Amino acid sequence: MNESKEFLKEYDDSKYKKPSATVDMIILTAVDVETKARSVPDKVLRVLLIKRKGDPLVVDITDPYKGKWALPGGFVNYYEDLDAAAIRELREETNISDVYMEQLYTWGKVYRDLRRRVISTSYMALVDSSKLNIKAGDDAEDACWFDVKITLLEEVKTQIKAGYIRKTTYELSLVNSENEIKDTVIVTKKLEGRTSKIDLEYVNNPSGLAFDHATIIFYALERLKNKVEYTDIAFSLMPEMFTLTELKKLYEVITGKVIYSRNFRDKMEKQKKMVIETDEWESGKPYKPARLFRFNPDWVEDQ
Amino acid sequence: MNESKEFLKEYDDSKYKKPSATVDMIILTAVDVETKARSVPDKVLRVLLIKRKGDPLVVDITDPYKGKWALPGGFVNYYEDLDAAAIRELREETNISDVYMEQLYTWGKVYRDLRRRVISTSYMALVDSSKLNIKAGDDAEDACWFDVKITLLEEVKTQIKAGYIRKTTYELSLVNSENEIKDTVIVTKKLEGRTSKIDLEYVNNPSGLAFDHATIIFYALERLKNKVEYTDIAFSLMPEMFTLTELKKLYEVITGKVIYSRNFRDKMEKQKKMVIETDEWESGKPYKPARLFRFNPDWVEDQ
DNA sequence: TCAAAAGTGTTTCGCGTACACCCATGC
DNA sequence: GCATGGGTGTACGCGAAACACTTTTGA
């Protein structure tokens, strides 16, 4: 039974064909977008993508994703911690360190990359856009920020014996002034008896992202959506000081829900005590100035 | 910036030293333990461990974990999906498939295994103990179930500039009739400004588990604890039919909290509608027979 | 004067928590 | 009869959701 463990002893580290280990970075930020004049701008999430070399129109069966946009990432060195590889990639792309970073999931389908066997661990990094704007696309590389949006397209539920199969189809759209990428992600939940299973699957779209990166971005946004409800993760995307309406706008774009400001204020300030008021005020806006708040470092989860 | 991606083109798959990819399985089940006669037994979680070959008393600096207990696991084959490797390992150990399984986390510190560089993805499998008892330790291998318990030892919070460091020390104890393993896991949460970071760290204990496996088991139990609150994950550990007190006992051992049965009943049956009553009844107990329930396959999360 | 947002008072309803009590069984 | 759990009635308080209203600013 335990042959594999014992096999280690004789295992020659260089003799057998091994998968390659890589990291993929989902680097997210939130920026303001003007909706109408004289109004508080909405927030939108952005993700950093890089353009792969090559001509997307030339068919190459060993590398069908040439010229397509992809998540930044790269190989894990033999003498480098997995986390360290992620931090290194982040710095290479954004010139920033010391931000919130979290490992998400490891993607290991055999044919996710047709050139060779790659097992890729994805990391999500959250960057305050006010600290950014320095680099990200300042060298020869095509690295660009894309506005992210997920739209529910369809949900089909089929009853089966002692359970059901539910297929939910989403469109992931990645847009900036020069590009428009649309990808389809299908979430399949199968419940049969007491064993349920969830599968993420992407539809290969000619105008889409490289590899399974649409799925990975979808997964990151889901994680962010879940965590924003019970952690302080959102503040990594905000500047040091902010108004409660700005914070509310961020929560709205992450959760995809409309929030009532009356209750949001009470929750943040009185109940959860996640924010502290400062003595500083917004100014220059064509409406009543708002007080600026900051994150309460003594906030503790649950309670 | 994107050299690594481009480097792929020239990259010879066999030329460079690569980390090895492995999977580690946290196979959990829940069994009854008699507390006092005439009472409903409590539940306890069990994890499957295997004993590594070798003499733990002989010092071997290239493999200090000889003869110690470890999580089952093994290498990922070049032409094998990561999930498939986990399923294969599960079958090899328990002879069971078709159970709840979930990827947890990927552990990639350089020196977590001193023999060679290993990046290991951990999977948690939940097995209904009534379906088990077939195999798990029936061949030459030393594979045994261990009762798992986590105890909070100490919590130290240190204030630092614009935040704090909180170190929480837990004891992970793994016990069966012949063995008693104690390991220490330290969770460090550092919050500074708006960037918080959580680290899991294990203390090398002479009577402890091999590698960083104490940390991995701790992580699995935390995941289980979180998920039990908002998913149907607990039912993977229960037989087809059960009384509500049995289910409550399982929730208690997973969450580590005492539950009031009055409210648990209402929540499961009326509010969340996770269970359906059957027409069958428990019997032979020295108290009023309880109705048997089963999982409601039409249950949907949230709502 | 007006649009837009800041900020506060208040109600309603459901859920989590809790106390109290009667019922049924085997020993 | 007693210990033990099965099962139900009910009350209290908080938090989520919602409605309503006053205040302050720049244009």
Image (cartoon, coloured by chain):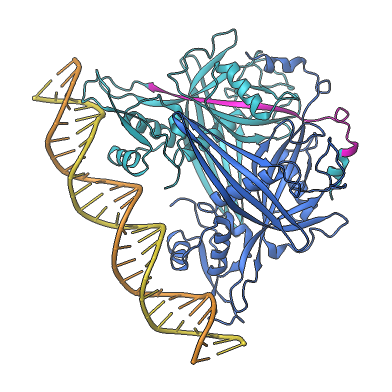
Chain colours: A blue, B cyan, C orange, D yellow
For image coordinates 62% across by 21% down, the residue present is B89
Answer with left or right where residue A65 lies relative to residue B165: right
Residue B16 magenta: yes
Q: Quadrant of residue B114?
A: top right
Q: Is residue B68 left or right of residue A302?
A: right
Q: Please provide the residue range marked out in magenta.
A: B9-32
Percent across and percent down for residue A134 are 78, 63
Q: Position of residue B14 (x, y in %)?
A: 86, 27
Q: Is residue A100 found inside the magenta-colored segment of the image?
A: no
- Is A79 drawn above or below residue B67 in the view shown? below
A199 or A13: which is nearer to us? A199
Q: Residue at x 39, y 25 (%)?
A: B240
Q: Measured along the vertical axis of the image, is residue B251 above or below residue A257?
A: above
Q: Residue furthest top?
A: B140
Please name the residue shown 57% across and 51% down the image. A152
Residue B170 in sight here: no
Left-right relation of B227 to B21:
left
B207, above or below C18, in the image = above
Residue B19: image location, x then y, percent: 77, 30
Instruction: Give percent across and percent down for residue A197.
Output: 54, 33
Q: Nearer the viewer, residue B1 or B144?
A: B1
